[in-house]
Image (tube, grey):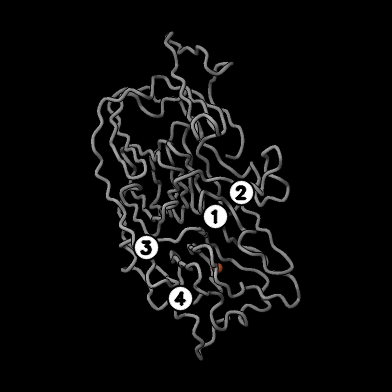
Amino acid sequence: MPSYVRAGELPPKRHIQFRRPDGGLYAEELFSTKGFESVYSLLYHVRPPTATLEVRPWKRPVPALHANEPLRNRHFKTAAMSLGEDAIESRTPLLGNSDLLVSIADAKRPMDYFYRNVGGDELLFIHYGEGTLQTPFGDLAYRAHDYVVLPTGTTYRVLPASPTRMLVHESTGMIKIPRKYRNEFGQLDESAPYYERDFRVPLLREPNEERGEYEVRVTNGGRNAIYIVQNHPCDVVGWDGYCYPYAFNIAEFAPITGKLHQPPPAHATFESPGAAFCAFVPRLFDYHPLAIPVPYNHSSVDCDEVLYYVSGNFMSRRGVEEGSITLHAAGAPHGPQPGAVEASLGKTSTDEIAVMVDTFKPLLLSEQTPAIEDENYYRSWIETAEPLPR
Ligand SMILES: [Fe+2]
């Protein structure tokens, strides 16, 4: 989590009596991680968040995943996929393993229910669209190119103001800021590519004190349920702590560039158990007079690399387009396509925007992927007579 935040009204001490204007007690909620031993927040509800009227089954489809067999590099085109209207129901898993599930989703209409993933943190990347995530911590506005971090157990609903396409990462653990960016006190250090000021936190509104029947769909590692609760989840008058949803727009990412090519870890944004996230944003290229701007050839022997192409001119890749996903599988060689090195020489900057996640366990493919795969991608490094456009 970025740092300590407080919002709204709070009692002077935690765990003491804190009364409403009508004399009743506010209901304190500990929103914690790793039991009681890691980051947490304390929220003060007008009425208890525990008042459950009914629990019903939620028959949520289980993603069907199969091995990347034969093991090869792959390219999926997601732009034209028709996913649905609802930010949760439209989630379409594409890749996954026991640490992470990667899906795409559309939000075209407001959710009339809340959603809570208790199985791990979620990281949304907003490709396009804008709107609001309504949470007990307040309203978190989102816009294109935002990363949104939702800690385990965050209750939320997506209220799009315009059609929204997002890349969804469901982790089984915590999505964290890399340790290398923090000083001994936890503050982002001077060499980090972002700063606490770049992170946006929810704006706490007046508590919704209505009582009724509110639907909260809960998921936890494949177990699902629909809770009908008596009190509106957004009835919070104040909260403080280190654990809360937040947003970070990658336009705020200040990329680290160098005299020679910087490897992907220089572009790291977040990490989670078994996965590392990076953002490639508009930047100046390397300034050695003989520098080669595009990456070298390599085989990532111990991780699968997933790139999601957002916008710009993707210089080292022929055939990719906005919404393309490339999977460079551990051990499968890849690099600039023929002609890309020569075409890149002398270029001083790039306008490309892409986000990446590397996983250390092999990624499986969902049953949705054959229909959107460019099956010849693994042959796209073959030399042809056709030069790359400069
Ligand atoms: Fe790579």
Give the mark nearer the N terminus: 3 vs 1: 1
Marker disc for residue 365: 3
Looking at the picture, tell me which residue is in the foreground, 30 or 282.
30
CA separation in Å, label 2 and label 4: 32 Å
- Judged left or right of residue 301, residue 362 is left
Vertical position of residue 176 compared to residue 303: above or below? above
Q: Amino acid at mark 1?
A: Ala
Q: Secondary structure at mark 4?
A: loop
CA separation in Å, label 4 and label 3: 21 Å
CA separation in Å, label 3 and label 2: 27 Å
Q: Which residue is mark 1?
A: 276
Measured as percent of width and height from the top left, residue 307 is found at 49, 63
Give the mark nearer the N terminus: 4 vs 3: 4
Mark 4 or 1: the one toward you: 1
Q: Do residues under tags 3 and 2 come within 8 Å of each other at their CB atoms?
A: no
As drawn, which residue projects farthest toward the bottom? 385
